[in-house]
Amino acid sequence: MTTTIEASDLTKRFGEEVAVNGVSFSVAAGEIFGYLGRNGSGKTTTVRMLTTLAKRETGSHQGNPGKSR
């Protein structure tokens, strides 16, 4: 299956506070994916990095959305 989203070693800090520390995952086309965690665990920050609303400090990501339905 084709990978639609891939994140590798994403890290984001706000001052001295590490919000996201080395997150990596991939999502295949057609796969149902849930991203769960406690309050303040970096879920929103990770999504912001994936959508380029926040700059990542390390790591990489890519997306291949394919056809819209």
Image: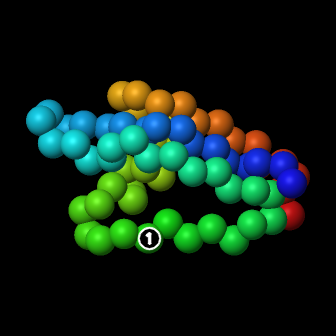
Residue neighbourhood size for the residue with mark 1, other residues' Cα within 10 Å, grouped as few (<14), some (14–19), many (≥20): few
Name which residue type carries label 1: Leu
Q: Secondary structure at mark 1?
A: loop
1 left or right of 42 in image: right
Q: Is residue 29 visible?
A: yes
Return the x and y of residue 57 as percentages of the image width and height: 36, 28
Rendering quarter of residue 60: top right
Q: Residue at x 15, y 42 (%)?
A: 17
Q: How is the image coloured?
A: rainbow
Return the residue at label 1: 36
The quadrant where residue 6 appears? top right
Quarter of the image for the N terminus: give it. bottom right
Identity of the residue drawn at 74% across and 49% down: 4
**28 vs 51: above or below:** below
Quick check: can you spot residue 54? no
The residue at the point 69 percent across, 71 percent down is: 32
Q: Position of residue 35 (x, y in %)?
A: 50, 66
Locate the C terminus by quadrant: bottom right
- The mark total stands at 1
Residue at 56 percent across and 70 percent down: it is 34
- On screen, residue 21 above or below 38: above
Residue furthest to the top in view is 58
Direction from residue 45 to residue 51 in the image, left or right:
right
The relative height of residue 28 versus residue 34 in the rendered view (above or below) is above
Which is more toward the observer, 51 or 7? 7
